[in-house]
Image: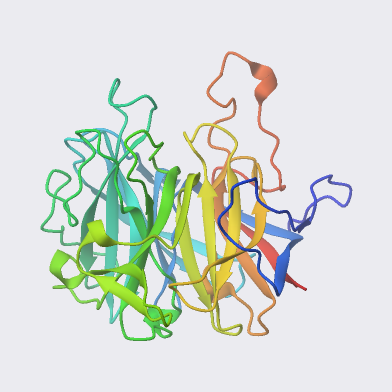
Amino acid sequence: MPTWPDDHPAARRRTGGPPPGCPLPRSTDLVGIEFTGRYATYEAADTWYPTWAADGHLYTPWTDGSVGGFACGSKGFLAATGHARIEGDDPLDLEVVALGSSFGNPEPYEGRYPAGSLVVDGVWYYGTYCLDTRPGSRAFWDVMGPFVGFRTSHDLGRNWTDPPHTPAAPLFGESSRDGTPIRFGAPHVVDLGCELEHSPDGAAYLVAHGATDPDAICGWVGGDHVSLARVVPSPATMNDPAAYTFHAGHDADGTPRWTDQLVDAVPLIDWPGHTGTVTITFWAARERFLMWVTAGGRGIDPMDSYLCEAEALTGPWRLVTYLPRFGPQAYFLNSPSRFLSDDGRTGWLLYSGNYTDHWGHPEDPDQVVTADPPGTSYAMVLQEFVLLEA
């Protein structure tokens, strides 16, 4: 069983506050997390977002690497994304079973990547979004493109039906080709337990990051805000924009408002330059939602991440801890509900990290990454953590 070295200088307890300007209040009862030092790594790919199915397994997208003999890359005309099944009860002893890969033309964008994933009622919904890395498209390298839509599988990944949408005509009608930033980018399905068992209304909820300022860094791991949408899932509704509503703030008495117009959505978090890839999980034992956010900016530098908590999906959200240079380049953070303890104390953080060894300067060999925490690598990484209470 891999564990951190006893003399490793990385702090196990992470209780830090945010940089100046943070709009989030601090949590009053959760003051941080502590990593136990136990971890595991699997395969050599990233973009792991497991969804818990009724058969007890997790089903996940992945890309830009290889799993079980399948190799995928998400750029260019032959962009491909993979899918896999994760078997096992112990995060330190899992089996990742490769199920195949699917091509998805990204044109008129440069790349196409996995996003929200959900298994419910025996149907697997697998979303993809686009990035634009064309020279001169903007002042930085990874402009966020639109969320395309969901391909569907009625046999848990053996066969797939493509969505009726394309990158040029995506589900929510957004485009970044004219320099307009994406409002609802790279959405991920909120983890509400096994096949949405803890959904308050039978709906699937999607959380995403984006921006409205044309000068914002709005990329795969950079943005200004975090927004929420919902849909009652079925093969007909998941790709029907009219079936979605977006969180639009609260009434005076605190009742959440919803709108069918994305332009009227009100963010859960509005923190310019400090949002990015975001996931939410419901921890049933605590009756609490956990939100992981990575504020990665351009995506080639060390990345900050942070953990928030709330008693309701629509907030108010409170900061548990801020993790500067976590990884130091960890991204796609999520906590699968399958691996959250029944006592509400111990869970597992899943992420990938350190995909570039030299921060964009390969001519300088002295800038090689040192994993912090230990175990962080370009893989499916699982780190055990404990919530620290006041």
Q: Position of residue 78 (x, y in %)?
A: 23, 37
User: In the displayed image of the protein, which residue is found farthest to the top?
Assistant: 363
Q: Up-down: is 139 above or below 250? A: above
Q: Which residue is found at the position 58% from the left and 13% from the top?
A: 363
Of the pair 351 and 281, the residue shown nearer to us: 281
Q: Is residue 270 visible?
A: yes
Q: Position of residue 279 (x, y in %)?
A: 46, 61
Q: Position of residue 317 (x, y in %)?
A: 53, 67
Q: Up-down: is 167 above or below 333? A: above
**Quadrant of residue 286 within the rendered picture:** bottom right
Of the pair 9 and 177, the residue shown nearer to us: 177
Of the pair 95 and 18, the residue shown nearer to us: 18
Q: Seen in the image, is 84 located left or right of residue 305?
A: left
Q: Which residue is found at the position 13% from the left and 73% from the top?
A: 236
Of the pair 22 and 176, the residue shown nearer to us: 22
How many labels were placed on the picture?
Answer: 0
Q: Up-down: is 63 above or below 12? A: above
Quadrant in which the C terminus is drawn: bottom right
Q: Position of residue 329 (x, y in %)?
A: 59, 40
Q: Which residue is found at the position 20% from the left and 34% from the top?
A: 177
Q: Is residue 240 visible?
A: no
**Quadrant of residue 378 within the rendered picture:** top right
User: In the displayed image of the protein, which residue is found farthest to the front?
Assistant: 252
Q: Up-down: is 174 above or below 121? A: above
User: In the displayed image of the protein, which residue is found farthest to the right?
Assistant: 7
Quadrant in which the N terminus is drawn: bottom right
Q: How is the image coloured?
A: rainbow
**Quadrant of residue 28 within the rendered picture:** bottom right
